Amino acid sequence: MESSLIGYSRGDASAKTFQATNPANGEELPTNYAMASEEEVMDACRLANQASIPLSQISGAEKAVFLRTLADGIAAIVENLVPVMTAETGLPEPRVRAETGRTCGQLRMFAKLVEEGHWVDARIDRAQPNREPLPKPDLRAMLRPIGPVAVFCASNFPLAFSVAGGDSASAWAAGCPVIVKAHHAHPGTALLVGQVVVSTLKKCEWPEGAFSLMFGEGRSVGQSLVKNAQIKAVGFTGSRAGGRALFDLANAREEPIPVFAEMSSINPVFLLPGMNRERIEEFTTGLMGSATLGVGQFCTNPGIVFHPGGEFGDKLISAYVEKMKSVESCPMLHQGICESYKQGLSSLASCEGVKVEYEFESECDGKSSYAGPCVLRTSIADFSRDSSMMEEVFGPSTLLVSYDSVDQLLDLVQYLEGQLTVSIFGEKQDLKSQELLIDHLELKAGRILFNQFPTGVEVCEAIVHGGPYPATTDGRSTSVGTGAVLRFARPVCYQGFPDDWLPAELKEGNPLSINRCEV
Amino acid sequence: MESSLIGYSRGDASAKTFQATNPANGEELPTNYAMASEEEVMDACRLANQASIPLSQISGAEKAVFLRTLADGIAAIVENLVPVMTAETGLPEPRVRAETGRTCGQLRMFAKLVEEGHWVDARIDRAQPNREPLPKPDLRAMLRPIGPVAVFCASNFPLAFSVAGGDSASAWAAGCPVIVKAHHAHPGTALLVGQVVVSTLKKCEWPEGAFSLMFGEGRSVGQSLVKNAQIKAVGFTGSRAGGRALFDLANAREEPIPVFAEMSSINPVFLLPGMNRERIEEFTTGLMGSATLGVGQFCTNPGIVFHPGGEFGDKLISAYVEKMKSVESCPMLHQGICESYKQGLSSLASCEGVKVEYEFESECDGKSSYAGPCVLRTSIADFSRDSSMMEEVFGPSTLLVSYDSVDQLLDLVQYLEGQLTVSIFGEKQDLKSQELLIDHLELKAGRILFNQFPTGVEVCEAIVHGGPYPATTDGRSTSVGTGAVLRFARPVCYQGFPDDWLPAELKEGNPLSINRCEV
């Protein structure tokens, strides 16, 4: 029996419990997890609130030590993670190792960011006591932590977007306490990482309220967290319905708070009219890899391809179907996802004008949650008549949509919802002639790619993993890369304070040697 | 009869009309303004949407020309503005001239910002084709315009936060079309400025959808704007009820959009225990000036002062009352504000433990809207028992709250709502011993001042005119200063595009010579 981590304490183990299920065979895993009570949520929020001020005073160098120690600690338990995470998620061992590496890499990236310190957007307007008609005061501003952040573990990234994943790492980097709601599908993975976080906090002598991990099966723990007045922001990766529900809850509070929910994207791919047909072989190989990576369970999975019709289209479809036939079915992350995939495919297949070109049998029978690839086709005329075809089908399927003219694409693009990514394939010399289409597509996405596939999101300075609604609830943000830290910070201006009182980032002598805007 | 400006056209002048009122004498002003119809709102939004892509392609240098030409145009009509604005607002002529200067200064500040171009937060991750285990693609990101912005004119800044004020200027700087809802209290001022905007657009050959100005008396025009799917963000300065209503409306949309509403702040002032009593004279002079500036109708008006009790407090109160007796009553901006001020004072005076030390008779009789200063006092014990005392009273009043110990302040600060500003007065050597109090206060405000008063907001790089709710609906933003442009932009990442297709800001050769983060 395991229970929540509430600062340095453990939750009540006598509460109602739940177990995780192995999606490969449908069997319940042995460990029981006690669900957090309303009081335990309040305790965690109270501790987080108490930690807000001490954490906000910790220097970038000290935060870097914490983040790197945490990365080392997680890297050190990879052998423990392999059996637990493979059993809870059905993901293969190499993925566990790779995602552990990505998670540690993210923590180290934020360590470097806060150690260098430029991210705080320091702005200095010096006093001009002799200015006419009025003297100018001394004003200095920088980004400061927003306060306690509630983070929801993502089912599709049990490490990289869960307990010590991108949301938590960027919140700590900003100087915010974090309360994580574990995903019910992988509580054991969450607990292993959570225990490393707690031991790292102790090692670095951080206040215990900097981290809590809450278990819960249904919605009540998550809702209590978002409604708690001590929580000042929310990070979430998951379904559109789930993200919107949290967003609505947060905005209905007496004091509304920002919700950074990364939710839903069909990541459309556009093949420009002039694309060389010799590239079909290479393109379909790449598309197959991207569409079926991780059993299609990536936010940036390319779900829809718009391609020239006629002979080009026929050649493309048959080449793609041949590729997809080589893909075997694999367990999806949990039964709910597998059921949604099956339902999504069946409702897509029933749309007027949609033809199923290939479908691997998916087994989702309450015992196992195996899913295989699916290829569907339609025309842009039929697609434009039925907006339900734009809904995300989370899994390894592709809808191929043929068009006859770029005008049809231009008409369609007006009605396209916000996306994490839009990919364009074609010849360089055609970019100029399709400028209007690309300008329209840019309005719809956080990241726009040329001749590349959207999966394999780089964790770096320039990445944008965001986009207009419903890709996210805040199209002005990114949840991947160093820019993610900006979600959990707000500018504060200090006017007229003596130099020795100011934060190091704003002192006249610039002791941290950071980039500043100085006037 | 005047009507809305819908791009380069005029609205239907046969619609229902309204007139402005002179708050100094209660007389209706002669001009009739036709309220915009639902169709006219839709037309303006359609034009704005059409202008989105052309505007997003306009260079920083071209935007600078537009903003400077607009500033010159507004400066050139100051003699026309003086009679219209003084009649509509009761503000004195010097204020009209000063606010015209501030408005033009803001436009020029944003011109310089976009001309220099550093603001776009350009980030470049170069390709590493030989990286193991996977090559790194080329990723380049920058801030791009969010789309059409609805701006609501503020009653208390008929120029600087109205038609071509801070919200519009920062939206244009970001490359966004703007639709302004004129304030019903100063439609003539709005129209004069709006006509300059239109002529500037024509001169600079900008698309007409870059600007519309809608007249309306009640809420319907504003609500239609915020609900329109083409609108992608909202800027608002006004009451808490008004801002929250727009925020709720925007979040209830199928596609929610950000609302940057600057709403309500009591801008508390804290006198530290060790403050030298010799400074009472200077402090009360400054407080009187700040609290009564513009008849107390500034967002940063200091409404509440926490001060040591006992002999210090008695001396402070009597000195302050003497100062306030020298202040004459003046017309407030409109009758609604004057009535709210009277009601706010009466409900504050009726709170248990509150004593009115001085009150100038306010005339708010349906004919004129004159208001004078008011000084009230209470103890922190009584203040802590009645949260209604924390509500903003918009006008030239001050509530003086005596305390006995810093512990009382620390208790109170936990329950303080978000503020635009918090001001601290005291001796430098006491800052260190009151660090905990100041750290708590920082959590509550966008700007924190030492030995200075919060009115007279500098328009500069380092200013933060924002703060946690209810000061604003987005505590991560500022509505004054160059940082205001960040509200209307979102990051877009370009992956794998050839150099000659990339925006100038991201080209390999950095032709604009802007600051970039390059890896």
Image (cartoon, coloured by chain):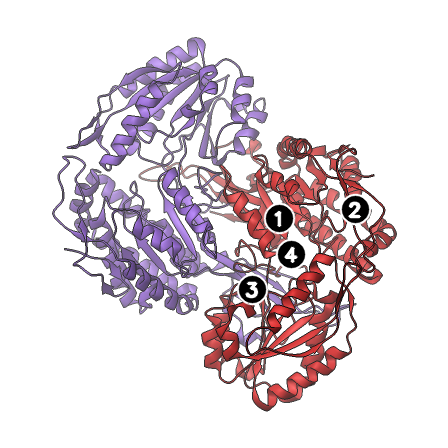
Chain colours: A purple, B red
Q: N-terminal of the two: label 2 or label 1?
A: 2
Residue B235, label in figure: 1
In the rendered structure, the answer to whether residue A368 lies left or right of residue A242 reads left
User: How many angstroms separate mark 1 from mark 4 (CA)?
Assistant: 14 Å
Q: Amino acid at mark 3?
A: Gln
Quarter of the figure that contains the N terminus of chain A: bottom left
Q: Position of residue A282 (x, y in %)?
A: 37, 21
Q: Position of residue A207 (x, y in %)?
A: 33, 68
The residue that mark 4 highlights is B481
In the rendered structure, the answer to whether residue A381 lies left or right of residue B366 reads left
Residue A433 in sight here: yes
The residue that mark 3 highlights is B419
Mark 4, other Cα within 10 Å: few <14 / some 14–19 / many ≥20: many
Disc 4 versus disc 3: nearer the observer: 3
Q: Are marks 3 and 2 in contact (CB under 8 Å)?
A: no
The residue located at (73%, 51%) in the rendering is: B108
Q: Chain of mark 2?
A: B
The residue that mark 2 highlights is B19
User: How many angstroms separate mark 2 from mark 1 (CA)?
Assistant: 25 Å
Q: N-terminal of the two: label 2 or label 4?
A: 2
Q: In terms of image quadrants, where is residue B176?
A: top right
Q: Amino acid at mark 2?
A: Gln
Q: Position of residue B188 (x, y in %)?
A: 80, 47
Residue B436 in sight here: no
Q: N-terminal of the two: label 3 or label 2?
A: 2
User: How many angstroms separate mark 1 from mark 3 (CA)?
Assistant: 18 Å
